[in-house]
Amino acid sequence: MSREEVFERLNAVFQDVFDDPSITVNDSTTADDIEDWDSLEHINLIAAVESEFGIKFSMGQVVTMKNVGEMADIILQKL
């Protein structure tokens, strides 16, 4: 799977979790960029991403992700 395909699928997950079809994520997107992205929604987002890609993040990976680009890098490593 290419990085572009990962981002296409991540966009769909973000749009679904935050119920906002206008969201488009990129490498530098952070929680500060999405209005409803708080700690509770972060848990929902991680679960939705894990489900979409059939992977599991470690707690260390979850707490060290600084942006969506790092999330995509971890996903690509796990696929």
Image: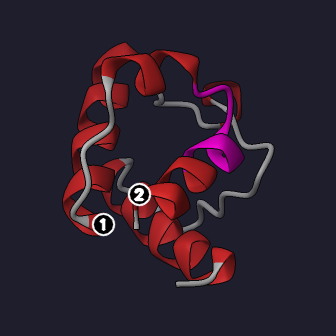
The picture quadrant where one finds residue 5 is bottom right
Please name the residue shown 52% across and 67% down the image.
Answer: 11
Please name the residue shown 68% across and 35% down the image.
Answer: 67
Please name the residue shown 26% across and 55% down the image.
Answer: 55
Residue 14 screen position, x and y as percent: 44, 55
Residue 25 screen position, x and y as percent: 66, 57
User: Is residue 38 visible in the rendered structure shown here?
Assistant: no
Secondary structure category for the residue under label 1: helix
Name the outermost residue toward the right. Answer: 28
- Looking at the rendered structure, the kind of residue marked 1 is Phe
Q: Which residue is mark 1?
A: 53
Judged left or right of residue 65, residue 17 is: left
Judged left or right of residue 7, residue 29 is: right
Q: Who is closer to the viewer here, 53 or 42?
A: 53
Residue 56 among magenta residues:
no
Evaluate if marks 1 and 2 touch, with contact meaning CB atoms under 8 Å apart: yes
The residue carrying pointer 2 sits among few (fewer than 14), some (14 to 19) or many (20 or more) residues within 10 Å by Cα, namely few
Q: In the image, is residue 26 above or below residue 31?
A: below
Instruction: Give me the C-alpha separation between circle 1 and circle 2.
Output: 9 Å
Residue 47 screen position, x and y as percent: 22, 42
Q: Which residues are magenta?
A: 65-71
Q: Who is closer to the viewer here, 24 or 61?
A: 61
Q: Which residue is mark 2?
A: 78
